Structures are given as structure tokens and as C-alpha cells.
Image: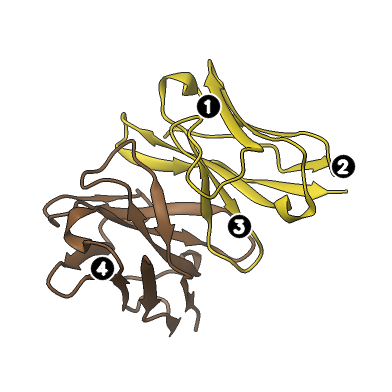
Amino acid sequence: EVVLLESGGGLVQPGGSLRLSCSASGFTFSSYAMNWVRQAPGKGLEWVASVTCSGGITYYADSVKGRFTISRDNSRNTLYLQMNHLRGDDTAVYYCAKDEECTYGTSYFDYWGQGTLMTVSS
Amino acid sequence: SYVLTQPPSVSVAPGKTARVTCGGNNIGSKSVHWYQQKPGQAPVLVISYDSDRPSGIPERFSGSNSGNTATLTISRVEAGDEADYYCQVWDSSSDHRVFGTGTEVTVL
């Protein structure tokens, strides 16, 4: 059974930093691209970032590029999202999502975690 | 950036057919995926690559994609189908993945 478990959410001040983690099990982690998708309270889904299966190539939404960094540790079956220079509009539930393929592109998100809430507020 | 437009809401009586549209410039040339999200839960894939149904998804769910509109069709709607539905594509021009604005399906 595929399980994705996010952690690291919480309350952070504007301008601050936070790192989210996603622990994966039930599949060969190093064979699939991984993603972060967020959802602001009462709003729709927003793709945030993706990383290929090797970790060698990353992709970012314009809204987070230069502030967020996606990475993975295939030896620990763990995905990360380092978030810096946080703003109020970054407040959201952050979901970790497994990709269907190793590479990035037309594929879909076939498994999702339950999400972790990050709130940016003073 | 590429924009996907969905109607905010669709209402349907039990046993009838619900159609959720996803509009985008020449979306027919892209692969469209659909997700169902119930309150307080993570999204679940219901249709991939325009019309493929993952295992475990009822045959009542189907999809199509042509021209500037992709459509998710839910036949013989049940109360348990009440949820938000999102379309999603990859925009090769920007190299971004894009979600639609989302549609709330209400079963009357």
C-alpha cells in the first residue's frame, strides 16, 4: 500500500522559513517523480513544485520560484520542501503527491498524502 | 500562463448525468487528468489521459477532450459523488503543471 505522510507544518512569521517533509512507503521511491501541491483555505489546488526520480531536475510554479526548494533523499524515501521568505499567501495545506512516471511532464498524480497545514502569520 | 476554466458549481439530481467542463486554449492537444476531492480529504484521481479510468473508479465516470473543452461525465449520479472536481494538464510552453479552477458538484 502506498503511503505518503507529510510533516513539518505549523505557524511561521512572515519572512520566515520552514521545511516540509514527506515520508514515502509502499513503492520504489527512487523510481518516481514527486510533487508538492498546495491548497489555500477555501481555495483550489495549486501545483507548487516537482522533482524527477533521480532528483536531478526540479520545476517550480512562478509564485514560489526563487523562494522554495524541492529536494529528495532516495536513501531515506523522503521528499522535502524548503520554504524561505514566506508570505501570507503561502498559507495553505501542502500535499505531497507521487507521480506516475520517473520524469516530469504529461503524467498525473496517482497518490496523495493527507497534507500538512502551514500558516504564515504574525 | 495557461489557464483552465471550470464552472464554479454543477447541480444534478440523483440518477441523472453530471457534466463538468474544463476550458483551455486548444486543450484538445493536451492530456487532461481529473481529480475528485471530498471535504477534508486529499484529492483522488478519477480520470487520466482524457478518458482512462484508474482501477477502483466506477464505470460511471468517463472523460472526453476535444478542441477547447475537456469534459468529465458522471452518469447515474449518486450522493457519494458530491465533491469538488479539478482538471489538470501540463503546459509545455511554460513547463508548468496547471489545475483548473475547480467545480463543486452538488447532488440535489
Colour approach in the figure: by chain
Q: Residue at x 55, y 41 (%)?
A: B100
Q: Earlier in the sequence, mark 3 or mark 4?
A: 3
Residue B105, above or below A82: above
The residue carrying mark 1 is B24
Residue on which the image places disc 2: B13
Q: CA distance from mark 1 to mark 4?
A: 31 Å
Chain letter of mark 2 equals B
Let me know if marks 1 and 4 both belong to one chain.
no
Q: Amino acid at mark 2?
A: Ala
The subunit letter for the residue under badge 4 reads A
Q: Residues within 10 Å of mark 2 (few under 14, many from 20)?
A: some
Q: Give the structural element (helix, strand or loop) at label 2.
A: loop
Residues at marks 3 and 1, CA–CA distance in whole angstroms: 20 Å
Q: Residue at x 31, y 30 (%)?
A: B92
Amino acid type of the residue tagged 3 in the rendering: Lys
Residue behind mark 3: A43
Q: Amino acid at mark 1?
A: Gly
Q: Residue at x 42, y 29 (%)?
A: B31
Q: Colour of chain B?
A: yellow
Q: Which chain is brown?
A: A
Q: Is residue A54 left or right of residue A85?
A: left
Task: Please report contact status of discs 3 and 1: CB closer than 8 Å, yes or no.
Answer: no
Q: Are marks 3 and 1 on the same chain?
A: no
